[in-house]
Image: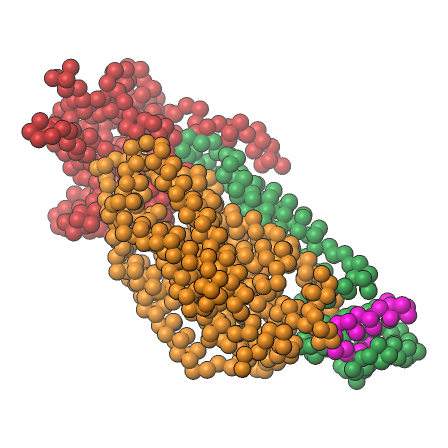
Amino acid sequence: MQRRHEDIKFADVNNDIVRSLVETGPRYYVTLAIAVLITLACFFFPWFYQLYYGIGAAGMNHPTVWGTYLASFIFWIGLSHSGTLLSCVLHITNSEWRKAMYRSAEAMTLFSLMVAAMMVMVHVGRPWFIHWALPYPNQMELWPNFRSPLMFDVMAITTYLTGSSIFIYMGSIPDFAAVRDRTTGWRHHMYVLLSLGWRGTDTEWHRLGWAYTFLAVLIIPLAVSVHSIVSWDFAMSIVPSLHQTIFAPYFVVGAIYSGTAGIVTVMFVLRKYMNFEHYITKVHFDNLGKLLLALSLIWTYINVVEVFTGWYSNDSAELESLRYKLFGFYAPLYWEMILFCAVAPLLLISKRFRTSFVPMLILSIAINIGMYTERFLIVGTSLSRQYLPDSWGVYVPSLVEISILVGSIAMFCTLFLIFVKIFPSVSIYEVKETLPAPDEGKTQWQATH
Amino acid sequence: MASNALGLFGGPTAALAAAGKLKGAGFESLDLISPIPLHGVEEVLGKKTSVIKRFTFFGAIIGGLSGFVLAAGTAALYLHPTGGRPIITFPPFLIITYEMTILFGILATVLGFLISARLPVLRERIYVPESAVDKFAVTVACEADEDFKRATEILREAGAEEVSEIAPGGGRR
Amino acid sequence: MSLIDDFLARWHEYRRPGYYEEFDYHWTMTVDLDRCTGCEACVTACQAENNTPIVGEDAIARGRHMQWMRIERYWEGEYPDVKLRAIPMFCQHCDAAPCETVCPVSATYHNQDGLNAQIYNRCIGTRSCAVYCPYEVRYFNYNNHHWDEPLDQQLNPDVSVREKGVMEKCTFCIQRIRQAKDAAKDDGRRRVQDGEVQPACVQTCPTEALVFGDRKDPDSAVSQMLGNERAYTVLEELNTDPSVVYLKKVDADAA
């Protein structure tokens, strides 16, 4: 019973999306329970053990004091980079295909940022004092050091988290109002509060439109700055192969790349399990595929440049670091990354590939595995080959670290599963905008442009 | 007696046309309630301006200033000479300034939105639940009974599916 | 408004690179590699003086040794014509230290004596200082350590015992510097004289390869060494401006 996109009526949109919120099958509860259990067992339990024992529970050692926790932090921050950023860019460029998918893409941003913040807590040696990195007046009269790249991170991520929560919330107010009228009980009360008494008058729409556009304009430079700043945690050091001017664009491109792949994964899951087949269509996968292809080419280019400039410098420390990365202990991981992130995405040249769902899902997961490897290699290979050969070493993640990585993925899934039952995961009013108006043969958008 | 007339329409074109006619007939206090943002509403009801842009602009400026003051001021409050750098260094503090500009810009935009859209609603207002699905409503505030009659007539002529009266309290009759 | 006036009046101080116009003392160490035999007596002395934990075999195997001072060992040439190069390596107390700027909570900073100070209580364990340090001389407490009997009886009461999750490193035996300064003050003198303060490693070195003193005193032993033509600093090209100066080993047959 595949309906054509043009045949969907306004009321169908409300029905379909309210159904996705209130009708919950046993499959959902089972999935949620599994996700919560894995989060508890694989994230919180090892983390509490680590709090008790010390960071020694992880595999970090003398030269390689940063490990998978930091790699995961960059990975999750990176994954957050496509949702809100892409949504903002597509919003101000008035893109039609954004409207069915932006809500869940933004949710991805929000939740991966939250998981990234948890990774910081896991990463530091004394997380019970993490508040010392926040600027608040205190009786010690001590303030954080704003000259530190890590403080830039604190400021940027706080701003980004605030900005993207506000952005997703503001875009959902009219939808909360629509859902409010259709729900009962605690859900009704919740949506009454969340919708702020939205009525949908012309004035309200006008104000929302302006505020939303301003937010989009503010968030685009913010998102670019966030991952630049994350890259400066590394690039501001003088460690060979980390001290690179290309790191900021490299990280931003990598982040958008991995985030877009993440969107493909999430879209596939939503489409399949939330019955959004006629909202999320081949058009979306086709467009996302084109974007992925472009990003993979830029990413490959920057990787080549990084190797080339390192080699051209002929600096002994830089050369050793490069040799270690390409042919050393971690070399299989490096070539796996090249295969997953540079070679495999070339398949996207074919339109048939871009519009087939399962291959796109497999590719998107492969890209994110490759991108995680990239982050791991940035931390692992550079730190284990620094200036003094006496303190060279090898770092291998411990079981606790691997478990926490698995647990962080489960935590992301848990948050997302809760999200799909509270937020309309497809925007009701923006999908309606793409449909033909009830008394017209064509869409609003087509009528005015 | 002051009351509100309400016309429900099946589509945006008819609703906009009705609003235009009411505007032409001298009604000033008009509201269009719709499930989607209507394009072309400004041509009918006149150009809207909002104060949000001022909020964003001044919020961003205040944020930028306070960002620099936060970084430079706290550095001066407790001196920690580090790495042969000055206590107040511009490149890092400009990054803090940049982030705080955006943070305050965002927060001020939200404040501006809430104030100018008069949200959250604290007392009851005219609300049409159908307009959250697929109906387009036009509400008119009428001073006298005559005005109300005139308004309902115009709404019917414009093809309203339903015309009713809304008491000042909000309930539909 | 006095706060703002005060701020503006001190603006030029805030903009001065490194903040200090002049250090009170400029503690410096020289390491004469010609004299160093690589005996590691300094390493042991440091461990005893500074309550550095004995981490055990397992942790060493995992690369988690805790030695504020280590002897780097390099082999030069091919067997049988092979030479041992031993280089004592410890915190270089750089005047332009990369580790200081990166700490988000200011747990490490430059003090008025030109020392790179580490505040254990303030450290939150981001470990970024250890990444930024090109000399790899910062050591992290991966877990709480304990001292077996009777070693717990010989802990130095002048030095704190660090908890898990905290970064630590060579302090140039700041507790001894403090004591020497206090003693000088009690004697009614204004300054510490040359030779009055020695870190544990310097005190222990049997060949007197290590010399410690105030660079600002032109007559101090360390100032005399600085003029030596063999003097160099490690990783000079990184412009970290270290306070530890090495004197190159010159082979008799090479000369």
Seen as rendered, the residue at the extreme right is B146
Q: Vertically, is B136 above or below A312?
A: below
Task: Name the spot of residue C14 as percent of width and height, x first.
Answer: 51, 31
Residue sticking out furthest to the bottom: B173
**Place of residue A181 in the rendered image (x, y in percent of width and height, measured from the top left):** 64, 79
Chain identifier, colour green: B
For the point 32% across and 66% down, which residue is it?
A42
- Quarter in which the C terminus of chain A is drawn: bottom right
What kind of colouring is applied to the model shown? by chain
Q: Is residue A274 left or right of residue A205?
A: left
The region drawn magenta spans B4-28
In-front residue for pair B36/A283: A283
**Chain for colour red:** C
Up the image or down, C73 lies above or below A275; here it is above
Residue C110: tell me if it is visible: no
Q: Position of residue B140 (x, y in %)?
A: 83, 73
